[in-house]
């Protein structure tokens, strides 16, 4: 387990392995494009696959919402599957799993001080590919 002093963490798994992103900014672009804040390495992911935005709670704290596509509203080719359900937008909660495409996923953590997160392999006994890569022209 790795300790993190951040409040929100996104642990991403893609073709290049696992990366951790401490979330502090008001917005993040997520996708295959080299200019994305959170770059995903997979041919099955759109250039601008998703947008992560920070929104305020009534108590002055904040949370993150993930939305399919880029900041202009252009949807991704594969969409988002969050906790097993396809959705266009979702207010993230601790340990939510976001699937961007085959072999590309992220887990969101809301960290408290001295929280540890798993660093071993993320295993999903139901991880199957339902997307035909030949059907995308991107």
Image (spheres, rainbow, N blue to C red):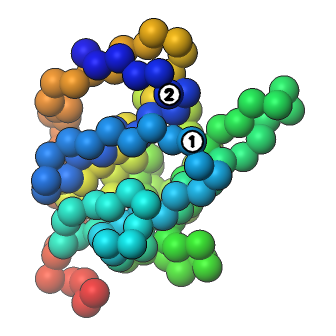
- Check if mark 1's residue and mark 2's residue have beta carbons within 8 Å: yes
In the image, farthest residue toward the right? 58
- Whether residue 100 sits left or right of residue 61 in the image: it is left
Which dot marks residue 24? Answer: 1
* SS state under label 2: loop
Relative height, residue 67 to residue 47 (above, below):
above
Relative height, residue 100 to residue 93 (above, below):
below
* Along the viewing direction, whichever of 8 and 99 lies nearer the viewer: 8
* Along the viewing direction, whichever of 36 and 92 lies nearer the viewer: 36
**How many other residues sit within 10 Å of disc 2, few (<14), some (14-19) or many (≥20)?**
some
Q: Where is residue 27 in the image (x, y as percent from the top left)?
A: 59, 57
The residue that appears at 36% across and 66% down in the rendered structure is 31
Q: Where is residue 82 in the image (x, y as percent from the top left)?
A: 44, 47
**Looking at the rendering, in which quadrant would you find the C terminus?**
bottom left
Relative height, residue 24 to residue 133 (above, below):
above
The residue that appears at 20% across and 53% down in the rendered structure is 14
Residue 107 seen in the current view: yes
Report the Cα–Cα distance between label 1 and label 2.
8 Å
* SS state under label 1: loop
Which dot marks residue 6? Answer: 2
Residue 84 seen in the current view: no
In the image, farthest residue toward the top? 114
**Looking at the rendering, in which quadrant would you find the N terminus?**
top left
* Upstream in sequence: badge 1 or badge 2: 2
- Whether residue 2 sits left or right of residue 36 in the image: it is left
Q: Where is residue 124 in the image (x, y as percent from the top left)?
A: 19, 34
The residue that appears at 53% across and 80% down in the rendered structure is 74
Q: Position of residue 7 (x, y in %)?
A: 55, 27
Find residue 11 and report its image quarter: top left
* Along the viewing direction, whichever of 122 and 56 lies nearer the viewer: 56
């Amino acid at each position: 387990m790795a300790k993190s002093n951040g409040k929100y963490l996104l642990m991403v798994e893609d073709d290049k392995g696992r990366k951790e992103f401490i979330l502090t900014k008001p917005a993040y672009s997520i996708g295959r494009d080299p200019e994305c804040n959170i770059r995903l390495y997979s041919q099955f992911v759109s250039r601008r696959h998703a947008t992560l935005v920070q929104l305020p709670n009534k108590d002055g704290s904040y949370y993150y919402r993930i939305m399919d596509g880029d900041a202009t509203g252009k949807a991704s080719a594969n969409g988002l599957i969050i906790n097993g359900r396809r959705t266009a937008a979702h207010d993230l909660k601790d340990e939510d799993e976001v699937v961007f495409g085959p072999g590309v996923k992220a887990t969101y953590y809301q960290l408290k001080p001295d929280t540890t997160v798993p660093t071993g392999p993320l295993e999903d006994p139901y991880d199957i590919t339902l997307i035909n890569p030949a059907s995308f022209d991107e």
